[in-house]
Amino acid sequence: MKYDRMRHDMVEKQIEARGITDVAVLKAMRKVPRHLFVSEALMDQAYSDFPLPIGEQQTISQPYIVAEMTQALQLSADDRVLEIGTGSGYQAAILAQIVFRVYTIERIHSLYVKARKLFDQLGYHNIVTRYSDGTSGWKDESPFNAIIVTAGAPVVPTVLVNQLAIGGRMVIPVGDQHAQDLIRLERDERGIRQTNLGACRFVKLVGEHGWSDPS
Ligand code: SAH
């Protein structure tokens, strides 16, 4: 299949070549059919080295960024992971390939519906979806072993950090609306350790503990 070859090429040239080594991440990215998470017109570009529009002025992240963020979460097979910003559903599908269960929240209804349908079609039964403002997290299902925020926040929302288990990891882009730093946090008994993984660019995290609603 054409797309299988493109996907293996993507992993070799964009992901492995740039130093991603987590075997589970590489395996997941070789498996998940990324072209099915974009519109038909963009399928041939799905394995290229850039983000793509998914409607509603939102984007599916560049493959490398997905790999980098997933690796930074240091996931195990029995982890429960929270994602804020379902979007196309691609990142959630990658996570679902690696961990026990994924909880993902989307604030735009049409994207939420589309992703849910796709998860069902592709058989991702370990992805739990929710339509709401994810900046407050998902208290009833907390604590999580990992939290991934796939939209740019003005600051790290404290409510989210509080939903991390001891030993839990979180990645979140933090900055202004044009450029952010990818921040990794780890919670241990003594508190939070924070590292900066470098520059990135995401659409806005809009909500109570994010940017205010533009509409
Ligand atoms: N992880 C996605 C990336 C989507 S882009 C993927 O793999 O395709 C970021 C998404 O975050 C957008 O769909 C946007 O609507 C959503 N988003 C922004 N603010 C949000 C919030 N407060 N709660 C939930 N989703 C939010």
Image: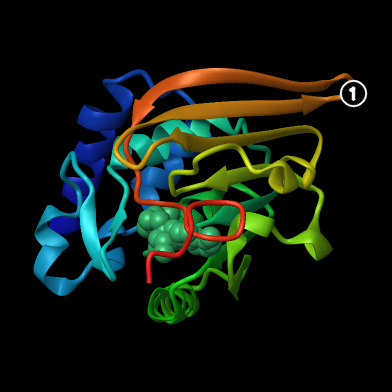
Residue at the image point whose x is 57% and y is 18% from the top: 195
Q: Residues within 10 Å of mark 1 (few under 14, many from 20)?
A: few
Residue at coordinates 67% horizontally, 42% vertically from top-left?
146
- Confirm whether residue 195 shows in the render: yes
**Which is more toward the observer, 91 or 208?**
208
Q: Which residue is at a point 45% across and 80% down the rendered structure image?
A: 109
The location of residue 156, given as percent across then percent down, is 61, 37
Q: Quadrant of ligand 1?
A: bottom left
Report the side of 182 relative to 131 (left or right).
left
Residue highlighted by disc 1: 189
Image position, residue 48 (x, y; %): 15, 44
Could you tell me which quadrant the N terminus lies in? bottom left
Tag 1, which secondary structure? loop
Q: Is residue 213 above or below residue 142?
A: below
In the rendered view, does 47 fall on the left or right side of 75?
left
Q: Quadrant of residue 118?
A: bottom left
Which amino acid type is marked by label 1? Glu
Residue 174, given in percent of the width and then of the height, sits at 48, 34
Question: Is residue 26 shown to the viewer in this render?
Answer: no
Relative to the observer, which residue lies in front, 138 or 3? 138
Q: Is residue 208 left or right of residue 65?
A: right
In which quadrant of the rendered image does the C terminus lie? bottom left
Q: Nearer the viewer, residue 47 or 172?
A: 172
Residue 83 percent coordinates (x, y)? 57, 54
Is 211 rendered above or below residue 133? above
| 65 relative to 42 in the view: left or right | right
Q: Is residue 93 above or below residue 118?
A: above
Residue under the image location 35 percent in, 44 percent down = 202
Image colouring: rainbow
Q: Is residue 171 above or below residue 207?
A: above
The total number of labels drawn is: 1
